[in-house]
Image: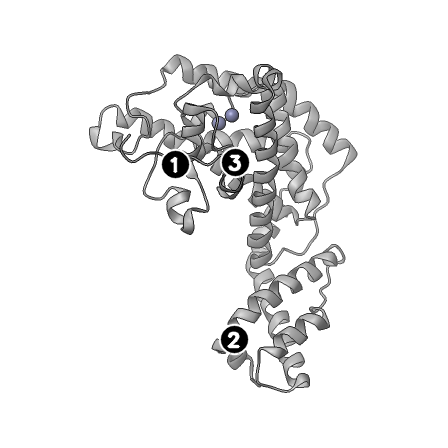
Amino acid sequence: MGSENELFSGREFAPSLWLALFSFHHRARKVRGRDTYEYHEPATALFILSTMNCSWQQGLADSRLCLAHHEVRSTLLLQPLWDLVRGKEGWLKSPFFPVLFSFMVYMLFCIPFLALDLLSSKVPSLRRYKIQPQRSPTAGVLLGCVLHTVYNHVVFIFPVTVAHWYWRPVSLPSVAPGLLGVLLDTTACLLLFDFQYFLWHVLHHRVPWLYKTFHKLHHKHTATFALSTHYSSAWETLSLGLFAGACPMLLKCHPLTEMAFFVVNIWLSVEDHSGYDLPWSTHRLVPFGLCGGPPHHDLHHLRFKSNYAPYFTHWDKLLGTFVDLDPKE
Ligand SMILES: [Zn+2]
Ligand SMILES: [Zn+2]
């Protein structure tokens, strides 16, 4: 275990390395604001040592070297991208940025599904991917959804983001986050968002007044299509925006991770409402049925009283509200 190459290629080292990196990442993140890094805690080194056939001193030295190298390499990987993003500091610190970023990313993700809607009406082989092939939105419905989204962004989301910009000015550290850190934090944010929205969603279905006043609008369309994603009341739009904003803040994520989470979050919500079960849909890529994907949420729009979690399936499975599409249907 003496040389760096041996460290990175040691088969027996791999499982403990993942756990150790997780711990190290969180330790390092605490000091990232000061552009410095710390090694993992001694407890982590002890854990690594217990899984390796080497002396305490050797294990500690090797694991520290390995973890430090990993974090440095990982940071170096994203540093050019982060430098590029920081180059647009003026934009990033503008009160207009969050609302424009969210709207543009949303529309960008909707466009391929809109094109698919247009194509599938002419190419029958594409319609087999549509979850409810007999239902398609009209041009008028699509336009109504776009106008509604613009209205909600201008009238409700923009004032809230300006208030946030005023009270919590954006700070951009000079050091990029590690790649592993970005992946772990983005997943943690998605899990937290999924839980927050699950609670909100169940509450707004179980309390009739809340459903009628705030959530019914989103259920106007019983067959989903990409632009129906943001067809919701101001309260629902603001709640989801608040949850999305709170997750990276609560988990103290790097701004680059925050952006990655926003992009993935918008993609997953659009995909959920796309109305298409494509071969590369999230629930087909993620194993063990952990993600519901578009069929899961389309079924919620169709039947109302099941599948409340937006992305993952564990909460619905645990609380008995999970329903799968009957293959005979
Ligand atoms: Zn609902
Ligand atoms: Zn929905």
Per the model, the C-alpha gap separating discs 2 and 1 is 43 Å
Which x, y percent locates residue 263?
A: 53, 40
Q: Distance between the Cα atoms at labels 2 and 3?
A: 39 Å
Three-letter amino acid code of the residue under disc 3: Ala
Judge whether 9 appears above or below 90 on screen: below
Q: Residue at x 55, y 53 (%)?
A: 183
Q: Position of residue 196 (x, y in %)?
A: 62, 36
Label 3 crowding class (10 Å Cα cut-off): few <14, some 14-19, many 20+?
many
Answer whether residue 286 is visible to the viewer in this image: no
Q: Which mark is residue 8?
A: 2
Q: Hey, which quadrant is residue 258 in on the image? A: top right
Any mark on residue 324, and which? 1
Q: Is residue 66 left or right of residue 277?
A: right
Which of these two is toward me, 296 or 20? 296
Question: In front: mark 2 or mark 1?
Answer: 1
Q: Are marks 3 and 1 in contact (CB under 8 Å)?
A: no
**Badge 2 density bin: few <14, some 14–19, many ≥20, Cα 10 Å:** some
Residue found at the very far right of the displayed protein:
167
Task: Note whether ligand 1 is within 8 Å of mark 3.
Answer: no
Say if residue 135 shows up in the picture: yes
Closer to the chain start, of discs 2 and 3, is 2
| Amino acid under disc 2 | Phe
Task: Indicate the position of residue 290 as horizontal and vertical percent values.
Answer: 46, 47
Which numbered disc, 2 or 3, marks the residue closer to the eye?
3
Query: Of the residues under marks 2 and 1, which one precedes in the sequence?
Result: 2
